[in-house]
Image (cartoon, grey):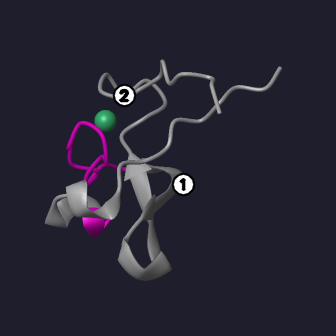
Amino acid sequence: MTRRRPKPPPMDELTYAQYQGWACCWCGTSLWTPEGGLSVGRSQGPHSTSIEVYACSRLCPQRPDKTPARP
Ligand SMILES: [Zn+2]
């Protein structure tokens, strides 16, 4: 069973803390915890750049879990 992973927000929608990997890319929760953040992929930026972004957990309340499965 393949579960689609929601795509992180684009780089221009990230706050400074989210950009730095200090905050959840979806809900903005600080990731200064013993567990740290969970890598959720790469945020797409201009000029084919991308950065790795993190979420607070797999159960992030703001995570867009219901992404349409259409191409
Ligand atoms: Zn979160």
Checking the image for residue 32, the label placed there is: none
Location of residue 27 in the rendering, given as x and y in whole percent from the top left corner:
24, 36
The residue that appears at 65% across and 30% down in the rendered structure is: 4
Location of residue 68 in the rendering, given as x and y in whole percent from the top left corner:
54, 22
Badge 2 is on which residue?
60
Checking the image for residue 41, the label placed there is: 1
Is 25 on the left or on the right of 38, as rendered? left
- Give, as a single range, the part of the protein colored magenta: 19-34
Q: How many marks?
A: 2
Q: Does the stretch in magenta take in 23?
A: yes
Callout 1: SS: strand
Q: Which of the 4 image quarters holds residue 57?
A: top left
**Mark pair 2, 1: CA separation:** 15 Å
Above or below: residue 29 compared with residue 15: above
In the displayed image of the protein, which residue is found farthest to the front? 71
Query: Which is more toward the observer, 2 or 58?
Result: 2
Callout 2: SS: loop
Above or below: residue 5 compared with residue 43: above
Is 36 on the left or on the right of 31, as rendered? right
Location of residue 37 in the rendering, given as x and y in whole percent from the top left corner:
41, 50
Query: Is residue 36 visible in the rendered structure shown here?
Result: no
Above or below: residue 25 compared with residue 16: above
Above or below: residue 19 compared with residue 47: above
Query: Which is more toward the observer, 13 or 54?
Result: 13
The residue that appears at 49% across and 77% down in the rendered structure is: 48
Magenta span dominant secondary structure: loop
Question: Is the residue at mark 2 in contact range of ligand 1, meaning its CB lies under 8 Å from it?
Answer: yes
The residue that appears at 30% across and 46% down in the rendered structure is: 24
Q: Amino acid at mark 1?
A: Gly
Q: Which of the 4 image quarters holds residue 13?
A: bottom left
- Please tell me which of labels 2 and 1 falls first in the chain: 1
